[in-house]
Image (tube, rainbow, N blue to C red):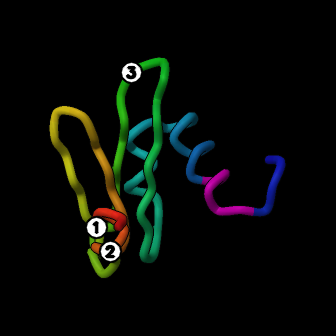
Amino acid sequence: FYTNTDTEVGLNAYKEWGNKCFEMFNGDWVIVLLDKFKRKLIIAKDQIGSLPLYFYNDNDLLAFSSEIKGLEPTR
């Protein structure tokens, strides 16, 4: 580990255990990982579901945010 952030813990847990790592996480959490080797984007959240996660997807854009205002167009 190089930092004191939980983000680094999540990334290393995924590297060690793959998708099984999400079963080991506790509390409220949302994580987004880009696995370049498997060529996939992983968006996962806790089973409690108290934290929101919003998506927008069309042919040109995939966007996600923890707040709906993060997906509103800028003026």
Identify the residue position indicated by label 3 in the image.
Answer: 39
- Residue 72: percent from left, percent from top: 28, 67
The image quarter in which residue 6 lies: bottom right
Vertical relation: 66 (above or below) 35: below
> Can you tell which of label 3 and label 1 is closer to the viewer?
1
Pinpoint residue 10: horizontal percent, then vertical percent: 56, 52
Pointers 2 and 3 in contact (C-beta within 8 Å): no
Callout 2 touching callout 1 (CB < 8 Å):
yes
Residue 69 — which label?
2
Q: Is residue 7 magenta?
A: yes
Callout 3: SS: loop
Q: Magenta residues: mostly which secondary structure?
A: helix
The residue stretch that appears in magenta: 5-9
Residue in the picture at 34% in, 77% down = 51
Q: Is residue 15 magenta?
A: no
In terms of sequence position, does the residue under pointer 2 or pointer 3 come before the other?
3
Query: Viewer-proximal residue, 60 or 48?
Result: 60
Dot 1 alpha-carbon crowd within 10 angstroms: few under 14, some 14 to 19, many 20 or more? few
- In terms of image quadrants, where is residue 62? top left
